[in-house]
């Protein structure tokens, strides 16, 4: 047991770790929403009247705690990005504190770490150094500065709480510790799928500390039961996605992946991840899988090192390297998929826990105190500077995608999003150019083609080039018929076109085309507020006031605090006057 003075030191150092993590990422609170932040934040609204239905059912992504956290933030901050960023910073600070506590408890376990004498002064320093490295590591910028990256922070927090609970259970054999492990494990799964790695981490740890076999069996059985509960709640369609033909719309696997190149892709990705943990330079939102032979060597070396350490019984270092590899496994599975970026910095948030604890341990082995603190200070200052510089890249969509395009010039996603950011800044010429560049890239999905065509249609509609806009919207829906934004915009195009038509019958016919497209969008996404608002406009134009009133009211009901809701309130008043034949202004 640690004595009381050392308990006080632990509390003080824990607060220091929390403060360091908070201060280093505090500048992010002035950043804006980027990429898909808005879609994630408003996701509960798009589900209809039950904003918490995301707890039951889900496709390849099932992260109800992420959506719950966004719903809670939304209730406080609405669409003010500062509050969401503040939450991310606080969560990262909590994760850093948990890394400190995890380091303390692992180092104290002599059967895992026989390199330390069980002395308090030999325990706190490496744990403190580990947590500070974790707090400032530039590789975490994507998870913290990107609001949508919160999923990795939440999953890591709950997984660490689960592991800490298991450490208590392994030492004191209290069944309550195992129950807490299972609860936090489920919470971690509710945050992100990579939490599955916990069961392997606990298995290896249990074997290293020579836990009784019955106790190991009970632990693994309990965690397996949690997984069963998770899949029951998820009502997953993942199996169907797994067996679907690679490359098809509903398939998990990509058609580009072949068995003969899986090994090189795997080693390239692992090498990339370990390189970025060791040397976090030239960070990029959409990196390509490296093909450099040196990267392959870096990717293979952790496995070789782990084998050597295991047979030499360096259990502590072996466990931490195993942590990195095992927590990377779910992310490596994405390499053969078509559901997201093959590799990404955010996938390193949880694996970096093992890396940072190992780094803190190695620093603490430096016997010369002056050399220890000088070298650590250089690393800490350099890491903080790189993190600060990377935070500025995440300031807004324009800065983010400009940086990404410069580093990934062959990425259709990067050019498309840079084009969108330019359009939002009213730079239509350059924005249109970037969208057309995106269409020329070799690797581009049908869904992205649909999105780009939709944006080009909106640009042409703005310039009143209605025939060209109509052509773009048709191409958009030809590429991907379920693009609800394109359907809604197509409807708005017909509504705009109707404004110049004087013949009432012809005008009504065109507006009915608008209604048909917008209703298709609403049938796909019942909670799509913009589509409901647009339908209200259409019905107001053809003087079907009851229907117009119904859709304007639904906009207000679903999101009473939005600017769209304020417009709906004004239009409701106009609708009411029109129903009573009362001239506006009297």
Image (cartoon, grey):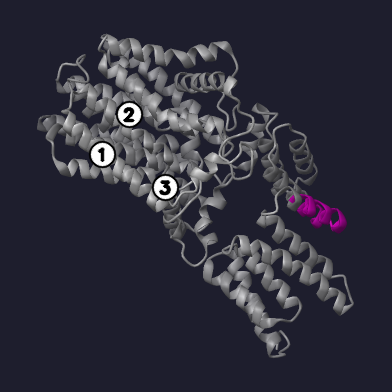
Disc 3 and disc 1 in contact, CB within 8 angstroms: no
Residue 381 x, y percent position in the rendering: 43, 23
Q: Nearer the viewer, mark 2 or mark 1?
A: 1
Mark pair 3, 2: CA separation? 19 Å
Is residue 572 depicted above or below 106 in this figure? below
- Magenta stretch encompasses residue 461: yes
Q: Pick whichever, 374 or 537, lies toward us.
A: 537
The N terminus is located in which quarter?
top left
SS at badge 3: helix
Q: Is residue 277 left or right of residue 156?
A: right
Q: Which residue is mark 1?
A: 221
Query: Alpha-carbon neighbours of circle 1 within 10 Å: few (<14), some, or many (≥20)?
Result: few
- In magenta, the rendered stretch is 457-476
Residue 297 x, y percent position in the rendering: 50, 11
Q: Main secondary structure of the magenta part?
A: helix
Q: Any mark on residue 87, and which?
A: 3
Q: Earlier in the sequence, mark 3 or mark 2?
A: 3
Is residue 549 depicted above or below 336 in this figure? below
- Magenta stretch encompasses residue 36: no
Question: In the picture, residue 569 is in which quadrant?
Answer: bottom right
Q: Is residue 586 left or right of residue 46?
A: right
SS at badge 2: helix
Q: Residue at x 21, y 14 (%)?
A: 115
Is residue 18 depicted above or below 479 in this figure? above
Question: Can the viewer see residue 80 in this picture?
Answer: no
Q: Residue at x 37, y 19 (%)?
A: 377
Disc 2 and disc 1 in contact, CB within 8 angstroms: no
Question: In the picture, residue 542 is in which quadrant?
Answer: bottom right
Q: Which residue is mark 2?
A: 131
């Amino acid at each position: 047991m640690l004595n009381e003075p050392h308990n006080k030191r632990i509390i003080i150092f824990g607060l220091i770790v929390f403060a360091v993590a908070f201060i280093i990422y505090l500048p992010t609170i002035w950043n804006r929403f980027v990429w898909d932040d808005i879609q994630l934040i408003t996701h509960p609204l798009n589900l209809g009247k039950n904003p918490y239905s995301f707890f039951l059912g889900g496709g390849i992504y099932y992260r109800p705690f992420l959506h719950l956290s966004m719903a809670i933030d939304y209730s406080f901050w609405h669409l003010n990005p500062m509050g969401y960023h503040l939450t991310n910073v606080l969560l990262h600070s909590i994760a850093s504190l948990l890394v400190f506590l995890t380091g303390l408890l692992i180092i104290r376990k002599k059967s895992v770490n026989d390199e330390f004498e069980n002395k308090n002064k030999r325990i706190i320093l490496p744990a403190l150094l580990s947590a500070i490295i974790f707090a400032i590591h530039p590789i975490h910028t994507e998870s913290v500065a990107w609001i949508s990256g919160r999923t990795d922070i939440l999953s890591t927090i709950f997984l660490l709480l689960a592991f800490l609970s298991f450490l208590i259970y392994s030492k004191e054999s209290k069944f309550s510790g195992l129950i807490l492990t299972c609860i936090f494990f489920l919470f971690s799964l509710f945050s992100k799928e990579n939490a599955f790695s916990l069961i392997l981490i606990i298995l290896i740890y249990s074997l290293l500390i020579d836990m009784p076999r019955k106790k190991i069996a009970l632990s693994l059985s309990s965690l397996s039961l949690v997984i069963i509960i998770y899949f029951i709640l998820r009502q997953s369609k993942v199996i169907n996605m797994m067996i679907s033909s690679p490359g098809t719309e509903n398939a998990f696997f990509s058609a580009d992946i072949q068995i003969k190149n899986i090994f090189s892709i795997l080693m390239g990705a692992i090498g990339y991840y370990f390189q970025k943990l060791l040397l976090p330079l030239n960070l990029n939102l959409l990196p390509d899988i490296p093909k450099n032979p040196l990267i392959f060597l870096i990717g293979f070396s952790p496995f070789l090192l782990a084998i050597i350490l295991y047979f030499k019984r360096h259990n502590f270092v072996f466990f931490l390297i195993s942590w990195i590899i095992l927590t990377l496994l779910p992310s490596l599975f994405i390499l053969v998929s078509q559901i997201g970026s093959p590799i990404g910095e955010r996938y390193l948030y949880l694996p970096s826990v093992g890396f940072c604890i190992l780094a803190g341990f190695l620093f603490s082995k430096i016997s010369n105190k002056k050399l220890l603190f000088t070298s650590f200070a250089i690393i800490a200052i350099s890491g903080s500077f790189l993190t600060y510089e990377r935070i500025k890249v995440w300031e807004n969509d324009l800065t983010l995608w400009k940086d990404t395009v410069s580093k990934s010039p062959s990425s259709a996603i990067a050019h498309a999003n840079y084009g969108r950011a330019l359009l939002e800044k009213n730079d239509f010429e350059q924005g249109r150019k970037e969208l057309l560049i995106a269409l020329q890239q070799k690797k581009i999905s049908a869904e992205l083609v649909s999105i780009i065509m939709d944006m080009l249609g909106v640009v042409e509609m703005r310039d009143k080039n209605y025939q060209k806009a109509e052509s773009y919207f048709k191409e958009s829906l030809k590429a991907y018929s379920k693009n609800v934004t394109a359907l809604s915009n197509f409807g708005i195009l017909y509504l705009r076109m109707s404004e110049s038509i004087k013949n009432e019958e012809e005008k009504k016919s065109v507006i009915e085309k608008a209604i048909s497209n917008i209703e298709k969008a609403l049938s796909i996404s019942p909670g799509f507020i913009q589509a409901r608002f647009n339908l209200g406009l259409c019905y107001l134009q053809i003087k079907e006031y009851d229907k117009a009133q119904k859709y304007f009211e639904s906009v207000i009901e679903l999101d009473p605090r939005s600017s769209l809701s304020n417009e709906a309130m004004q239009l409701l008043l106009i609708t009411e006057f029109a129903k009573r034949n009362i001239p506006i202004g009297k």
